[in-house]
Amino acid sequence: MKILITGSNGLLGQKLVKLLANKDGIELLATSKGGNRISNQSGYSYKSLDITNQLEVEAIFDEFIPDTVINTAAMTNVDACESDKELCWDLNVNAVKYQIKAAEKHQSHYIHLSTDFIFDGENGPYKESDTPNPLSYYGETKYEAEKLVQKAKTKWSIARTIIVYGMVEDMSRSNIVLWAKEALEKGNPLTIVDDQFRSPTLAEDLAMGCWLIAEKQATGIYHISGKDVMSIIELVNRVADFYGLDKSIISPIKSSSLNQAAKRPPRTGFILDKAYSDLEYSPCSFEEGLAILDKQLKA
Ligand SMILES: NC(=O)c1ccc[n+]([C@@H]2O[C@H](COP(=O)([O-])OP(=O)(O)OC[C@H]3O[C@@H](n4cnc5c(N)ncnc54)[C@H](OP(=O)(O)O)[C@@H]3O)[C@@H](O)[C@H]2O)c1
């Protein structure tokens, strides 16, 4: 199977490269904007690809002729999407359009990453067939891309996920667990929202979910997240418990008092039954995920 990954320098992208490089029966082409930021460069090829450049997208597809494409690249900073809508649309919608066209030409299986932010968070946890109603521009663009993917004239899948945590090399942005650990270690007072609920997802679990979709050639929409739903303040408390750090510095705050540019859905979380039964997806618990991450941090 010839697999093309976009955004391979990102959190999910790097975990996918780690999972699929040197795997029997797989020829892997990792692509991202700029140079390769993964130091281990064996067992796969790397090419620079800016997915907003249609000619570059077409050239890579024509040359590699992928059986499967996993599109992890996106504009993922939710607040930045509100302030730079043009770039957000270009990366999260137009770039998907270019890839779908190229995937249709070569009849590649197109696997696209999406988000819980396509939902309004009034009725979580959500199943795949629930009706989207995005609250933010990021959510709108990801939903728009989903609609394009669903109309593709080639095999397609959508893997939706929720706050992904983990550690990779030379990260362009942090994630909630790394942030919480660092902030707790500093010991300064922390105010954390208690009215947003999510299922944090270990990056390795998400990478495995994407691979299972590819391997089984499963099509349609899949919810791929962690299995525990918790408030953000509970998440930070559980990180403190795991590391034996002082929890008394954590106090609750409401989302409305934060003045963030993008509106967040209050309660998401996913029902994972479809992924369990079709894919045999088997995510770890939050504490098991923290233990895996901790080992990597110590190494
Ligand atoms: N992370 C989450 O909490 C979360 C939650 C729900 C859904 N998702 C979805 O899951 C997917 C993967 O997320 P992630 O956390 O792995 O994101 P990430 O760490 O931000 O990775 C995205 C990667 O795409 C690259 N990229 C940016 N612009 C590009 C372009 N024009 N062409 C090619 N590559 C480009 C980025 O490069 P640089 O590193 O150089 O910037 C980055 O390496 C995304 O589709 C996201 O929407 C993520």
Image (tube, rainbow, N blue to C red):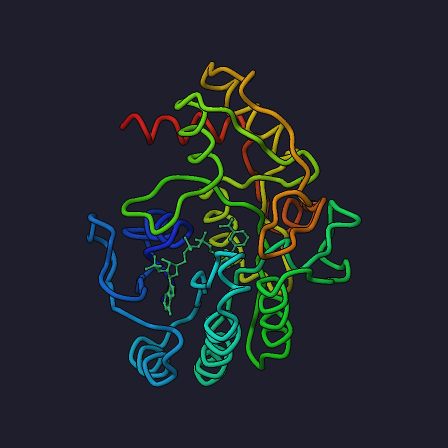
Q: Does 252 sit left or right of 247 as displayed?
A: right
Q: Please name the residue shown 32% across and 64% down the image.
A: 32
* Tally of numbered tags: 0
- Please tell me whether residue 31 is drawn above or below residue 104 in the rendered image: above
- Please tell me whether residue 153 is drawn above or below residue 127 in the rendered image: below
- Please tell me whether residue 207 is drawn above or below residue 73 in the rendered image: above
Residue 248 placed where, x, y %?
A: 56, 16
Residue 86 placed where, x, y %?
A: 49, 75
The picture quadrant for ligand 1 comes to: bottom left
Q: Quadrant of the N terminus?
A: bottom left
**Quadrant in the rendering for residue 53:** bottom left
Q: Please name the residue shown 33% across and 53% down the image.
A: 17
**Quadrant in the rendering for residue 137:** bottom right
Q: Does 273 sit left or right of 107 as displayed?
A: right
Q: Nearer the viewer, residue 284 or 134?
A: 134
Q: Please name the residue shown 26% across and 69% down the image.
A: 48
Q: Quadrant of the C terminus?
A: top left
Q: Please name the residue shown 66% across and 42% down the image.
A: 257
Residue 213 placed where, x, y %?
A: 53, 57
User: Residue lying farthest right?
Assistant: 123
Residue 64 placed where, x, y %?
A: 31, 75
Q: Does 128 sit left or right of 158 as displayed?
A: right
Q: Does 113 sit left or right of 293 as displayed?
A: right
